[in-house]
Image: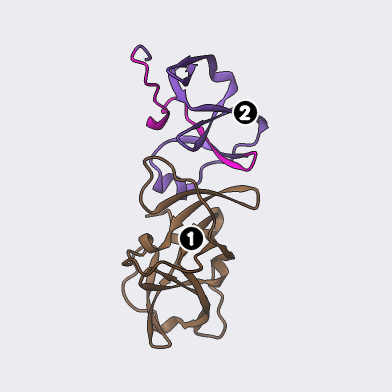
Amino acid sequence: MVDILVIERTGTCWGIERPLVRAFGRDEGRIRITLDSGCLGADRVVGMARGAAVRPPGRVLDRYWPVPSRGLLMHEGRVVVVIDPGAPPDALACARRSCP
Amino acid sequence: MTPVVSDAAAIRCLLVSAGEHLCAVPLNQVRRVIAALASRPLPSAAPELLGLAEFGGEPLPVLDLRRLVDAPAGATPAHPVTVVAWAGPPTSRELVGLAADAAISIADVPAAAVAGASRGLVAGEALVGERPVRVLNLEQLGLD
Protein backbone atom coordinates (compact mmCIF):
# COMPACT_ATOMS: atom_id res chain seq x y z
CA MET A 1 0.00 0.00 0.00
CA VAL A 2 1.37 3.34 -1.00
CA ASP A 3 0.14 6.90 -1.46
CA ILE A 4 -0.80 7.60 -5.05
CA LEU A 5 -0.89 11.06 -6.59
CA VAL A 6 -3.96 11.19 -8.85
CA ILE A 7 -3.90 13.46 -11.87
CA GLU A 8 -6.17 13.96 -14.86
CA ARG A 9 -5.20 14.29 -18.49
CA THR A 10 -7.77 14.54 -21.29
CA GLY A 11 -10.50 13.04 -19.15
CA THR A 12 -8.58 10.02 -17.87
CA CYS A 13 -7.34 9.67 -14.29
CA TRP A 14 -3.76 8.52 -13.82
CA GLY A 15 -1.90 7.60 -10.68
CA ILE A 16 1.75 8.08 -9.78
CA GLU A 17 3.33 6.57 -6.71
CA ARG A 18 3.97 9.59 -4.49
CA PRO A 19 7.60 8.71 -3.54
CA LEU A 20 8.50 8.93 -7.24
CA VAL A 21 7.44 12.57 -7.58
CA ARG A 22 10.36 15.01 -7.37
CA ALA A 23 8.75 18.34 -8.24
CA PHE A 24 5.73 20.16 -9.61
CA GLY A 25 5.74 23.01 -12.09
CA ARG A 26 3.39 24.84 -14.39
CA ASP A 27 3.88 25.35 -18.10
CA GLU A 28 1.48 27.13 -20.42
CA GLY A 29 -1.47 26.34 -18.20
CA ARG A 30 -0.51 22.70 -17.80
CA ILE A 31 0.94 21.05 -14.72
CA ARG A 32 4.36 19.51 -15.08
CA ILE A 33 5.33 16.64 -12.80
CA THR A 34 8.97 15.72 -12.56
CA LEU A 35 10.01 12.17 -11.80
CA ASP A 36 13.49 10.69 -11.72
CA SER A 37 12.77 9.18 -15.11
CA GLY A 38 11.41 12.33 -16.79
CA CYS A 39 8.52 14.77 -16.86
CA LEU A 40 4.79 14.23 -17.23
CA GLY A 41 2.03 16.66 -18.15
CA ALA A 42 -1.36 16.88 -16.47
CA ASP A 43 -4.46 19.02 -16.85
CA ARG A 44 -5.10 19.02 -13.11
CA VAL A 45 -4.24 17.31 -9.86
CA VAL A 46 -7.25 15.37 -8.60
CA GLY A 47 -5.91 14.45 -5.17
CA MET A 48 -4.01 11.89 -3.17
CA ALA A 49 -5.18 8.32 -2.70
CA ARG A 50 -3.64 7.49 0.68
CA GLY A 51 -2.61 3.93 1.36
CA ALA A 52 -4.26 2.87 -1.83
CA ALA A 53 -4.63 -0.79 -2.71
CA VAL A 54 -3.58 -1.08 -6.33
CA ARG A 55 -4.91 -4.17 -8.04
CA PRO A 56 -3.12 -5.73 -10.99
CA PRO A 57 -4.35 -4.61 -14.41
CA GLY A 58 -5.41 -8.13 -15.37
CA ARG A 59 -5.00 -10.21 -18.46
CA VAL A 60 -7.89 -8.67 -20.38
CA LEU A 61 -6.66 -5.11 -19.94
CA ASP A 62 -3.13 -6.17 -20.90
CA ARG A 63 -4.50 -7.86 -24.01
CA TYR A 64 -6.46 -4.86 -25.29
CA TRP A 65 -4.42 -1.93 -23.97
CA PRO A 66 -0.76 -2.18 -24.91
CA VAL A 67 0.53 0.27 -22.32
CA PRO A 68 2.33 -1.14 -19.27
CA SER A 69 0.85 -0.10 -15.95
CA ARG A 70 1.27 -0.88 -12.28
CA GLY A 71 -2.46 -1.47 -11.91
CA LEU A 72 -5.82 0.10 -11.15
CA LEU A 73 -7.55 1.66 -8.18
CA MET A 74 -10.70 3.60 -7.38
CA HIS A 75 -10.46 7.17 -6.13
CA GLU A 76 -13.55 9.25 -5.39
CA GLY A 77 -15.64 7.06 -7.65
CA ARG A 78 -13.27 7.19 -10.60
CA VAL A 79 -11.03 4.54 -12.04
CA VAL A 80 -7.34 5.43 -11.82
CA VAL A 81 -4.62 3.82 -13.92
CA VAL A 82 -1.36 3.72 -11.97
CA ILE A 83 1.46 4.28 -14.42
CA ASP A 84 4.66 2.34 -14.82
CA PRO A 85 7.19 5.16 -14.37
CA GLY A 86 9.62 3.34 -16.61
CA ALA A 87 7.18 3.39 -19.50
CA PRO A 88 4.67 6.21 -19.01
CA PRO A 89 1.84 6.43 -21.53
CA ASP A 90 2.30 8.80 -24.45
CA ALA A 91 -0.88 10.53 -23.34
CA LEU A 92 1.04 11.98 -20.37
CA ALA A 93 3.94 13.31 -22.42
CA CYS A 94 5.15 16.69 -21.28
CA ALA A 95 5.06 19.22 -24.12
CA ARG A 96 8.09 21.14 -22.88
CA ARG A 97 11.06 20.74 -25.20
CA SER A 98 13.67 20.78 -22.48
CA CYS A 99 12.07 17.86 -20.68
CA PRO A 100 13.88 14.57 -21.02
CA MET B 1 -14.99 -24.24 -15.66
CA THR B 2 -17.70 -26.79 -16.30
CA PRO B 3 -20.66 -25.28 -18.16
CA VAL B 4 -24.04 -25.27 -16.47
CA VAL B 5 -25.83 -28.22 -18.00
CA SER B 6 -29.58 -28.18 -17.69
CA ASP B 7 -29.86 -31.74 -18.95
CA ALA B 8 -27.37 -34.26 -20.20
CA ALA B 9 -26.70 -32.43 -23.42
CA ALA B 10 -27.46 -28.74 -23.08
CA ILE B 11 -25.59 -25.65 -21.93
CA ARG B 12 -27.74 -23.06 -20.22
CA CYS B 13 -26.88 -19.69 -21.75
CA LEU B 14 -27.78 -16.05 -21.68
CA LEU B 15 -28.64 -14.88 -25.19
CA VAL B 16 -27.55 -11.34 -26.02
CA SER B 17 -27.55 -9.40 -29.24
CA ALA B 18 -24.40 -7.73 -30.47
CA GLY B 19 -24.85 -5.86 -33.71
CA GLU B 20 -26.44 -8.26 -36.16
CA HIS B 21 -25.27 -11.33 -34.27
CA LEU B 22 -26.88 -13.27 -31.47
CA CYS B 23 -24.45 -14.60 -28.89
CA ALA B 24 -24.84 -17.21 -26.16
CA VAL B 25 -22.88 -16.67 -22.97
CA PRO B 26 -22.77 -19.73 -20.70
CA LEU B 27 -24.75 -18.80 -17.63
CA ASN B 28 -22.07 -19.97 -15.23
CA GLN B 29 -19.78 -17.29 -16.67
CA VAL B 30 -22.31 -14.50 -16.10
CA ARG B 31 -22.17 -12.55 -12.86
CA ARG B 32 -24.81 -9.91 -13.58
CA VAL B 33 -26.62 -8.08 -16.37
CA ILE B 34 -27.09 -4.36 -15.84
CA ALA B 35 -27.99 -1.28 -17.85
CA ALA B 36 -25.04 -0.17 -19.95
CA LEU B 37 -22.20 1.06 -17.75
CA ALA B 38 -20.58 4.36 -18.62
CA SER B 39 -16.90 3.76 -19.30
CA ARG B 40 -14.00 6.09 -19.83
CA PRO B 41 -11.84 5.31 -22.84
CA LEU B 42 -8.11 4.74 -22.58
CA PRO B 43 -5.82 6.38 -25.13
CA SER B 44 -4.25 3.93 -27.61
CA ALA B 45 -6.60 1.11 -26.62
CA ALA B 46 -7.61 -1.57 -29.11
CA PRO B 47 -11.05 -0.94 -30.61
CA GLU B 48 -12.49 -3.86 -28.65
CA LEU B 49 -11.79 -2.08 -25.35
CA LEU B 50 -14.41 0.59 -24.74
CA GLY B 51 -12.75 1.71 -21.54
CA LEU B 52 -12.82 1.35 -17.79
CA ALA B 53 -15.91 1.56 -15.62
CA GLU B 54 -16.75 1.11 -11.97
CA PHE B 55 -18.68 -1.94 -10.84
CA GLY B 56 -19.25 -2.79 -7.19
CA GLY B 57 -16.59 -0.29 -6.15
CA GLU B 58 -13.94 -1.90 -8.33
CA PRO B 59 -12.46 -1.03 -11.73
CA LEU B 60 -13.91 -3.04 -14.61
CA PRO B 61 -12.62 -3.20 -18.19
CA VAL B 62 -15.53 -2.98 -20.61
CA LEU B 63 -15.25 -4.70 -23.99
CA ASP B 64 -17.39 -4.20 -27.07
CA LEU B 65 -18.98 -7.60 -27.67
CA ARG B 66 -19.93 -6.68 -31.24
CA ARG B 67 -16.28 -6.11 -32.11
CA LEU B 68 -15.14 -9.20 -30.23
CA VAL B 69 -17.35 -11.41 -32.40
CA ASP B 70 -16.78 -9.30 -35.51
CA ALA B 71 -20.46 -8.61 -36.02
CA PRO B 72 -21.79 -5.96 -38.41
CA ALA B 73 -23.31 -2.99 -36.62
CA GLY B 74 -27.06 -3.16 -36.11
CA ALA B 75 -29.62 -0.51 -35.32
CA THR B 76 -28.95 1.78 -32.38
CA PRO B 77 -29.99 -0.26 -29.34
CA ALA B 78 -32.85 1.04 -27.25
CA HIS B 79 -31.76 -0.63 -24.04
CA PRO B 80 -28.08 -1.50 -24.19
CA VAL B 81 -26.68 -3.64 -21.41
CA THR B 82 -23.40 -4.57 -19.84
CA VAL B 83 -22.97 -8.25 -19.10
CA VAL B 84 -20.60 -8.52 -16.15
CA ALA B 85 -18.94 -11.87 -16.63
CA TRP B 86 -16.02 -14.02 -15.57
CA ALA B 87 -13.22 -14.25 -18.12
CA GLY B 88 -10.17 -16.43 -18.26
CA PRO B 89 -9.37 -19.87 -16.90
CA PRO B 90 -11.08 -20.86 -13.63
CA THR B 91 -7.84 -20.64 -11.67
CA SER B 92 -7.19 -17.04 -12.70
CA ARG B 93 -10.54 -15.66 -13.75
CA GLU B 94 -11.31 -11.96 -13.66
CA LEU B 95 -14.41 -9.85 -14.11
CA VAL B 96 -15.02 -8.01 -17.36
CA GLY B 97 -17.91 -6.05 -18.78
CA LEU B 98 -19.29 -7.02 -22.17
CA ALA B 99 -21.21 -4.20 -23.81
CA ALA B 100 -24.13 -5.68 -25.75
CA ASP B 101 -27.16 -4.28 -27.53
CA ALA B 102 -29.73 -6.22 -25.51
CA ALA B 103 -30.22 -9.17 -23.21
CA ILE B 104 -32.74 -11.43 -24.93
CA SER B 105 -33.47 -14.54 -22.89
CA ILE B 106 -32.11 -17.66 -21.24
CA ALA B 107 -31.86 -20.66 -23.52
CA ASP B 108 -30.61 -24.21 -23.40
CA VAL B 109 -28.13 -24.69 -26.21
CA PRO B 110 -27.73 -28.36 -27.12
CA ALA B 111 -24.03 -29.10 -26.71
CA ALA B 112 -24.13 -31.49 -29.64
CA ALA B 113 -25.54 -28.73 -31.84
CA VAL B 114 -22.52 -26.46 -31.34
CA ALA B 115 -20.69 -26.78 -34.62
CA GLY B 116 -17.83 -25.17 -36.45
CA ALA B 117 -14.24 -24.63 -35.55
CA SER B 118 -13.55 -22.97 -32.23
CA ARG B 119 -12.01 -19.55 -32.84
CA GLY B 120 -10.82 -18.25 -29.51
CA LEU B 121 -13.75 -16.53 -27.85
CA VAL B 122 -16.30 -18.17 -30.17
CA ALA B 123 -16.58 -21.86 -29.25
CA GLY B 124 -18.86 -22.58 -32.18
CA GLU B 125 -22.28 -21.90 -33.62
CA ALA B 126 -25.67 -23.42 -32.96
CA LEU B 127 -29.27 -22.94 -33.97
CA VAL B 128 -31.55 -21.73 -31.21
CA GLY B 129 -35.16 -21.42 -32.29
CA GLU B 130 -34.13 -21.33 -35.96
CA ARG B 131 -31.68 -18.49 -35.32
CA PRO B 132 -27.93 -18.93 -35.64
CA VAL B 133 -26.17 -18.19 -32.37
CA ARG B 134 -22.49 -17.79 -31.63
CA VAL B 135 -21.67 -19.71 -28.49
CA LEU B 136 -18.99 -17.99 -26.47
CA ASN B 137 -16.31 -19.41 -24.23
CA LEU B 138 -15.13 -16.60 -22.00
CA GLU B 139 -12.35 -18.76 -20.61
CA GLN B 140 -10.51 -17.88 -23.82
CA LEU B 141 -10.98 -14.13 -23.43
CA GLY B 142 -7.64 -12.42 -23.08
CA LEU B 143 -5.72 -15.58 -23.94
CA ASP B 144 -5.62 -15.08 -27.71
The chain whose colour is brown is B
> Count the marks: how many?
2
State the residue position of label 1.
Answer: B98
Q: Residue furthest front?
A: A29
Q: From the viewer's perspective, tell me whether residue A47 is left or right of residue B103.
A: right
Which of the 4 image quarters holds residue B133?
bottom left
The residue lying toward the viewer, choosing from A32 and B13, is: A32
Quadrant position of the N terminus of chain B in the picture = bottom right
Name the amino acid type tagged 2.
Gly
Chain under disc 2: A
Q: Residue furthest right?
A: A51
Whether residue A10 is in magenta: the answer is no
Name the amino acid type tagged 1.
Leu
Q: Is residue A36 visible?
A: no
Q: From the viewer's perspective, tell me whether residue B15 is left or right of residue B46.
A: right
State the residue position of label 2.
Answer: A47
Check disc 1 and report its element: helix, strand or loop: strand
Q: From the viewer's perspective, tell me whether residue B32 is left or right of residue A62.
A: right
In the rendered view, tell whether residue A63 sits above or below residue B84: above
Is label 2 or label 1 in front? 2
Magenta part of the protein: which range? A75-97
Residue that appears at 32% across and 64% down: B70
Residue that appears at 42% across and 51% down: B49
The chain whose colour is purple is A
Quadrant position of the C terminus of chain B in the picture = bottom left
Counting from the top left corner in percent of width and height, residue B11 is at 51, 78
Whether residue A80 is in magenta: the answer is yes
In the rendered view, tell whether residue B37 sits above or below residue A35: below
Quote the CA–CA distance across marks 2 and 1.
Answer: 30 Å
In the rendered view, tell whether residue B9 sits above or below residue B101: below
